[in-house]
Image (spheres, rainbow, N blue to C red):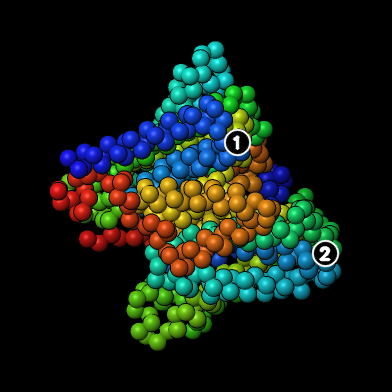
Amino acid sequence: MIYFFQQALNAVQLGSVYALIALGYTMVYGVLSMINFAHGDFFMVGAFLCFVGAAVWHLPFVPVLLLSMGGVTMLGVATERIAYRPLRNAPKVSAIITSLGVGIFLEHVTLGLNPYPKYIPPLLPSFSFDLGGVSVSTFQLATIGVSFALMFALHLIVNKTKAGLALRAISADRAMVPLMGVPVDKMIALTFALGSGLGGAAGVMYGMAYPVIDPYIGIIVGWKAFVSAVIGGIGSIRGAVLGAYILGTVEIMTAAFLPSTYRDLVTFSLLFALLIYQPSGLLGRVEIQKV
Amino acid sequence: MRTLRKALSVKGAAAAVFLCALAVSRYGLLDNYIQLILMLIGINLILTLSLNLINGYMGEFSVGHAGFMAAGAYVSSLLSVKVLAACSPFWAFPCAVLAGGAAAGAVGLVVAVPSFKTRGDYLAIVTLAFSMIVKSVIENIDSVGGPRGFLGMEKLTTLPWVCFWVIVTVWIIRNFIYSRFGRGILAVREDEIAAELTGVNTRNVKMLAFVVSSFFAGVAGGLYAHLLQYISPGTFDIIKSTEMLVMVYLGGVGSIAGSIMGATAYTVLLEALRPLGVWRMAVMPLLLILLMIFRPRGIMGFREARWLVPGSERDGGVKR
């Protein structure tokens, strides 16, 4: 039983990382109906900025977090400005292919600069508390705490501010909103800023949990996060968080109770089955096709 | 009469290309490196055409074609190593490749079923999930080497064989597009509900499109396995699928000529940029992004080379 609770804690930790990344996917999708395949690589850049902050500049935890979030936010906004905005009116697939291209570009620029996997030194003093037999490390506490705080902040921005209202309006009806005087381009840039910032934070969280990083981590972790967004129903913010914790739980529990090589098999089979029965995810909007 | 002559000239050109390939590999007219590149172009071309059928002509978005390729590669390699090893390779190899294609086609059926209900981005995820499942299953079967990969195939893929399969693929896909089913596929792309209302059996159309597409992806997988003589689950990951997507959209969706150009340009550029080392994969996507910004539909997007259109379809279907 204690083993189970220990694994449940790991699941919450992994789910938090997925949730932070999945939010970036789902927000961009909600506003632009575009899958930003480069988002996983934004996360990877976040992890590498965490390495730079921690190993090269020897900064403590909070400045490293701010560095990663700030750096990736700028990267996200710049990518949107340079690569995606010229394609706003092009066919949807061009934007998707461009995002794939941006992803490959980021991976290999990082690879060119860091040919070997990097080790991120511990950012926090490492000790663990004992909670009725379950040991809780400072890393886990920081990951879960910071993720919850960031998600709560996002919730406030989206639901309580004027900018958040504009975001929700754009996602509801993109043709009408510009007529109401909402600066759509600025709002899209804001979406990318928020989403990438969370991705950067996720990079730091991931780097604390799995300190050896290479330029390809963004691919698999990014796709997993994307899968969580789809499980929850892409475009839905609550759905992304729900999907991320479901995915984290399934992954950790499969690895804990079955041979760990079955992890991807079980995860993706569940996704496959879910999408057959619930084609728009758990909390996604059902698209009604009109003739 | 003119159409007949034109049709003959296309077939003649295909035959000439095949004979050239035969002569090149028989007498070693080109050095092995160039032959290898030509074979890779051919394999990529088959993959690109296969993906273009789903992404370009049917308007769905598959990101998991590496899964079909993996199925074809493993089945054909297993056959040629474990079953057909004693037979003459002249007969055994096409059988193995065909069997690989058939296996991939069967696997394609599994993905076709969710496509009845799911569309667009969600179907993309279904195909992605599916390719991950294939990869993961192979990793967990120890008798085919698991994550270590599988080897023991002889180098049976030669330039004439690749050439043969490329011609077969172009020929079948082109005829398929202009057949009754092909019209159905285009109708599904333009408007699925309207297609259904005008009597297109969308289920059959989707199923057939997936089976044909995955069949050719499997064939390409079989050729690939017998060219490199080593396959592992890691070969058929998301990066492979991404590569195929890039080739399709570089050349232009919904165009056979575009696929030919896309696959050739991509393979040749990657080789030409080899002196850049790691940085070539940073330069390549930059070129792709620039192309997308200045030419969002790819090189050929929805346009077709004249010689690939059947005579009766040219000039808006007016017979001359």
Front-lying residue, A268 or B111: B111
> Residue at the location (49% across, 29% down)?
B23
Residue positioned most to the top: B86
Q: Position of residue B47 (x, y in %)?
A: 46, 42
The label shown at residue B31 is 1
- Give the total of numbered labels: 2
Amino acid type, label 1: Asp
> Residue at the location (72% across, 73% down)?
A67
When asked about the image quadrant of residue B214, the answer is top left
Which mark is nearer the camera, 2 or 1?
1
Q: Is residue B22 above or below residue A26?
A: above
Residue positioned most to the bottom: A181
| The N terminus of chain B sits in image quarter | top left
Q: Is residue A82 above or below residue A256?
A: below
> Residue at the location (77% across, 50% down)?
A133
Residue that mark 2 sits on = A55
Q: Is residue A156 above or below residue A216?
A: below
When asked about the image quadrant of residue A123, the answer is bottom right
